[in-house]
Amino acid sequence: MKDKIKWGIIGLGNIAHKFANDLMLIEAAELFAVASRDAEKSKEFAKRYQCKKAYSTYDAIINDPEIDILYIATPHSSHADLTIQALQNNKHILCEKPIALNYGDAFQMITASKVNTKFFMEAFWTRFNPSFREAFSIIKKGEIGEVKYINADFAFYADNLDGIGNRKTDMNLGGGSLLDIGVYPLFLCYMVLGIPIEILAKSNFHQTGADLQTSMILQYENAQAILHSSFVSTSNIEATINGTKGRINLNTLWHEAQSYTLNVGDQEEEILLPTKGKGFTYEIEECHQCIKENRIESSLWSHQNSLDLIKIVDQVRNQIGLEYPR
């Protein structure tokens, strides 16, 4: 296989800049092309990251035959259409979370991956974070006993939530705290405890209909979780997994943790595992490994994992009455 895997990025917002910075840390990766519907934005982004091609339409980058894999960083509502189109055009795909607006769209995306035999993964970068992986391994080994309770939040104060085109509150873009950040606590519970048997959820809403804050109780046969997401207040952004023998804290900011703290009995130990770059590097490396091995999905965050999680998100949406236009 050729030395470098050529990447393209669709959607050039804040997260795309963070991803591009980390992509430059990977020797086997080349940022080859970027695309924005704003031509100047595309040119500026390409210049900043020494990228060869800057496109002003998404169709153009999807049809570029030199690109191996596309990172889709557009608003949630466009994930499904862009992913399916790109898979059909012989591209591997890393698509930002959440995978889609609902289970039906996600299923179609994964079907397109299988039909076209191209790699596809939802970009749940936390799954590949060293602190998370090590903490998850400790939990699986039973070192904190049987997990009985998880508490996790993800909240920040957003001071500008009004206006058409605001991805946080515009329903046409899949706005709301649940899909934007609430998926992280739900992801954590799914990874540790699996699929809940019951969900209770309540939200406060913006005038557009997007949820500004959502609180969730997840009921399992022998465990519970309390989760929260919000655009209207700050929080510690910490996660604690509590077992019968001890607990693990994924330290703030837990979704991109640089450390975790293990408490067993009267012993407490903080383990420092600083990330390479921001931390997108690990999911990038996973994409490369899967592509080299001709796999269409990752064993660490599989197609089924994405389907399970979006089904849980759909249950929360039904609980709070959050509906997106079609």
Image (tube, grey):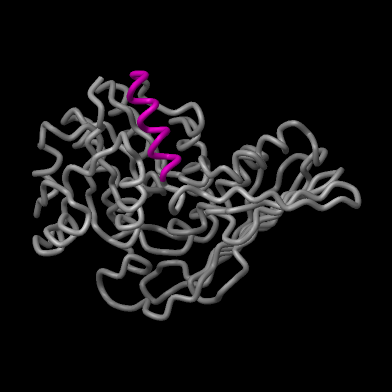
Most common SS among magenta residues: helix
Q: Which quadrant would the N terminus be assigned to in this image?
A: top left
Q: What residue appears at the point 24 percent right and 57 percent down from the top-left corner?
A: 12
Q: Residue furthest bottom?
A: 159
Residue 220, image x, y percentages:
71, 43
Q: Residue at x 21, y 43 (%)?
A: 8
Based on the picture, tell me whether residue 292 belongs to the magenta stretch.
yes
Residue 324 higher or lower than 206, as above or below: above
Query: In the image, which residues are magenta?
Result: 281-294
Asked if residue 250 is positioned above or below residue 8 in the image, the reply reads below
Image location (x, y in percent) of residue 204: 52, 72
* Quadrant of res 13: bottom left
Viewer-closest of 108 and 256? 256
Q: Which residue is outermost to the right?
A: 266
Q: Position of residue 94 (x, y in %)?
A: 33, 39
Residue shown at 51% from the left, 37% from the top: 308
Specify the quadrant of the image occupied by residue 193: top right
Horizontal side of residue 220 vs 83, given as left or right? right
In depth, the one of 61 and 163 nearer the eye is: 61
Horizontal placement of 54 versus 180: left or right? Answer: left
> In this image, 49 relative to 286: left or right?
left
Residue 208 visible, this orientation: yes
Residue 213 in view here: no
Residue at x-position 16% and y-position 45% = 33
Q: Nearer the viewer, residue 11 or 175?
A: 11
Q: Per the image, is 216 magenta? A: no
Whether residue 224 is situated above or below residue 40 in the rendered picture: above
How many marks are shown on the rendered structure?
0
